[in-house]
Image (cartoon, grey):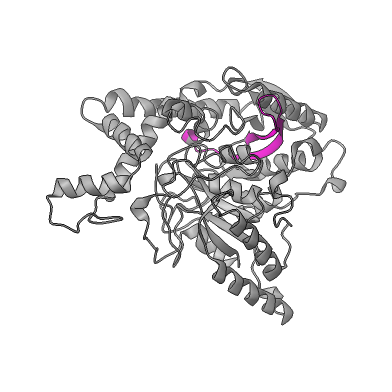
Amino acid sequence: MFQRRPLQLATRLLNAAQRHTRSAGVQSFITVDDDQVRRSAADIDERIRAGDGSSLGPLAGVVMGIKDTLCTQGLRTTAGSRMLENYTPPYDATSVGRLRKADMLLAGKCNCDAFAMGSTTEASDYHVTRNPWDQNRVPGGSSGGSAAAVAAGQCIATLGSDTGGSIRQPASFCGVVGIKPTYGRVSRYGLIAYASSLDCVGPLARCVEDAAAVLNVISGHDKADATSSTQDIPDFTQGLEPRESLQSRPLQGVRIGVVQQMMGEGVAEGVTAAVDRACRHLESLGAELLEVVVPSLELGTPAYYVLATSEASSNLARYDGIRYGLSSAGEKQELKALYRNTRGTGLNAEVKRRILMGTHALSAGFIDAYYKRAQQVRTLIRQGFHDALQQVDVLIGPAAPTPAFELGTVINDPLTMYKNDVLTVGLNLAGLPAVAVPCGFDDKTASNPLPVCVQIMGRAFDEARLIKVAHVFEQTADFAFGIPDSCSQNGRI
């Protein structure tokens, strides 16, 4: 769990962040708020010395980064896009506000693909974030900056958002823990929308217990978000025992379904080998492994990209040069010219591509063939997960079909990039939770072994069970974890 050495810890992590913000570094952040972090850390230090520690929140002194799609009062929020380059929100996202009340220290805003549209963080309008394990490779996306910041030792934890795998895939590429909660578990208020029926806010951290502690703080109903759930919130850290306190077979009686569609064609040999080893380890801990098929899961990617882009085309219509964001209204011009100039300047190629795809899917003559049909597929996938989870307690599969790939490999090949989401989008369509946890390394396709994560998936609002299984695995699987060599001496604690 977290340690309270606020000012000392904040200084070391900020130094690491600054080293990795240079052009030759990881570049996890768009904006770093050094002065505010140091002032807040010094204040917490003073309260501890004065004997006022009992009033501190559960995240006191914990240095965190926030994905730049989440609004932060008084701190620039760009969503990785030039469209919002000069936007400073007058309010906090609900999840950020709850973290502040818990005395979190906000280091800054993490880089991301513009408007969360991408799988590599190369589609940011500011700079490319690099993977701390190999700076010639991508960190994943769209929460790549959030995952890289944790892996590089720049933050204890971060927040990301997951629309189709944007927490779990970068967690896998960077070898950290990521939690995609049940849709509605965490408020979306203050999250700059991509696809409103799919977006989820969740934590990334070095270990399961830290991620669970952050999830404790950000979960819960929010009257500002009509889609947030009123379900009771358990203590997600309860019962997470250290290795020495675990029984010899701590997962005795737990039924784990290995999703067969996630282990076949298209998944790299090294990823399959790492997941197979993780499954054997879970079996040695007492779990019963079963082969499971989720009907219609293979239809998830085309359905997802119809639904997500359709919602995006609606959500991003507000950026017109009049109401929100960048404006080219410096000269007198016709309305269509204003729209064209503003969006031509403020939106990058990937964002435009997805808006066009969504607008086409919603247009007259095509809405029945694409949008409505995708909604029907969504229902089938949701039912498929429901049926599979009647047989087992949790499901398991890789969080990404490959390890981190080289920079520039897929950014100009959209179809290949979209296929990288094949293992994650189904959970978003079904609204179900998952925990991505490191399970080893792919030593088949890279000169240096690269991290791999499994995702442990479950029933709606059953995050506590997933976290417990992931924690037991983490505590007992020494083969699964590591620290990037480039970060071992760069401010890690």
Q: Is residue 318 magenta?
A: no
- Name the residue located 56 percent from the left edge and 33 percent from the top edge: 406
Q: Position of residue 223 (x, y in %)?
A: 43, 59
The residue nearer to you, when weighing 162 against 409, is: 409
Is 237 left, or right, of 109 in this rendering?
right
Above or below for 224 versus 206:
below
The residue nearer to you, when weighing 4 against 458, is: 4
Q: Is residue 445 magenta?
A: yes
Q: Position of residue 321 (x, y in %)?
A: 24, 53
Above or below for 216 versus 310:
below
- Name the residue located 54 percent from the left edge and 38 percent from the top edge: 432
Q: What range of the chain is rendered magenta?
A: 429-456
- Name the residue located 66 percent from the left edge and 71 percent from the top edge: 56
Q: Position of residue 353 (x, y in %)?
A: 33, 34
Q: Position of residue 157 (x, y in %)?
A: 63, 54
Is 442 left, or right, of 149 in this rendering?
right
* Residue 224 found in image quarter: bottom left
Above or below for 438 versus 323:
above
